Image (spheres, rainbow, N blue to C red):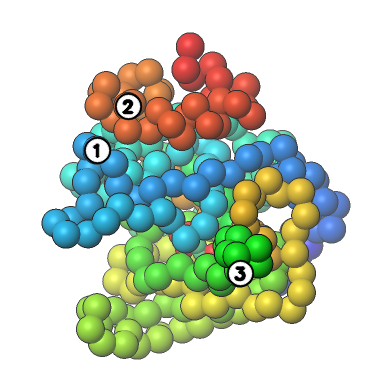
Amino acid sequence: MNTIRPRIHEKLNLIYQKDYVSASDKKNILDYLTTLHPIWENRFSESNPPPDGEPNRSLLRPVYWLGNWQFACLDYYHPPKGIHNRCVQAEKYPPVLQKIIADVEKMVRDKFSDKDIPSDWHLNTCLINYYGDKLEAENGIVKKTDMARVGEHKDFEPGPVASISFGEKAMFQFVKSAGKSQKSDVVLQQWLDDSSLQIFGGDKFKKQLFHRVQRVESKGLIFKNMNTTQFETRRINFTFRYVPRDHIQAYFRLPENLRTDIRSYVTQLSTKSKFWKEQLT
Ligand SMILES: O=C(O)CCC(=O)C(=O)O
């Protein structure tokens, strides 16, 4: 791992480190990714229908989760009220990510204020986002739609969040939200480069400001063998978070209606993953 010192805003509970992931770890991670089969999720379900008059919609990108899977239709982890039946136990991190996360957790404990680190905090949850173009066949021609962005939101899991990025660089912004009708003010922005690490925590970056990915560069890099169906991936981001263990539930322990809501996803995952196959039996 590269040992460049954290570069910016360390005192503010924000770290950005370029070239954090070594070339050999990156290769290991990309090889591991070829074994995963990300899925397309819908935001809503029978038990969690869309607001009145709105249709259900698919997420903008394929995703995969490790540690626990927060299916979009279960509404994501959102304390203090939304803590039960939202996080479903998922596959463990591969050794290369375990090693990286041990280092990141140490960096957080060294650099961030104790008051911003919950007592049992550890990065046990990972969302893998695939950014790129959706491919659709139209009259024999393949139409490409750029889906490489994330709207402003907060990550509600307690404590610092860390992310590592691969591929084309992304414009990441912290914003002060002005509601749906007006433009949000950008407070701070950072290009997230290939192999970089970003960590943010504390009241300002976790609780007050929203964050978003405004766009992802398109310089011709395309990942092959990522099993993203009808999708051309040019950036992959891993976001690591913390969910208290008591709030992570095995699939078979979910209430029946929620198991029904996510069964098609779990069934799809089970065709490629031993772990998810076992969850169904
Ligand atoms: O892709 C990124 O850099 C950020 C992703 C993100 O905002 C999230 O997963 O909550």
Which residue is farthest right? Answer: 24
Report helix, strand or loop for mark 3.
Answer: strand
In the rendered image, residue 120, in percent from the top left (x then y), is placed at: 41, 39
Dot 2 or dot 1, earlier in sequence: 1
Dot 3 or dot 1, earlier in sequence: 1
Q: What residue does disc 2 label?
A: 260
Label of residue 144 in the image: 3
Quadrant location of residue 162? bottom right
Q: Are marks 2 and 1 in contact (CB under 8 Å)?
A: yes
Q: Which quarter of the figure is the N terminus placed in?
A: bottom right
Label of residue 46 in the image: 1
Q: What residue is shown at x 26% (from left), y 34% (from top)?
A: 84
2 or 3: mark nearer the eye: 3
Report helix, strand or loop for mark 2.
Answer: helix
Report helix, strand or loop for mark 1.
Answer: loop
Separation of disc 2 and disc 1 at Cα? 9 Å
Front in this rendered view, residue 68 or 112: 68
Front in this rendered view, residue 270 or 31: 270
Separation of disc 2 and disc 3 at Cα? 33 Å
In the rendered image, residue 253, in percent from the top left (x then y), is placed at: 33, 19
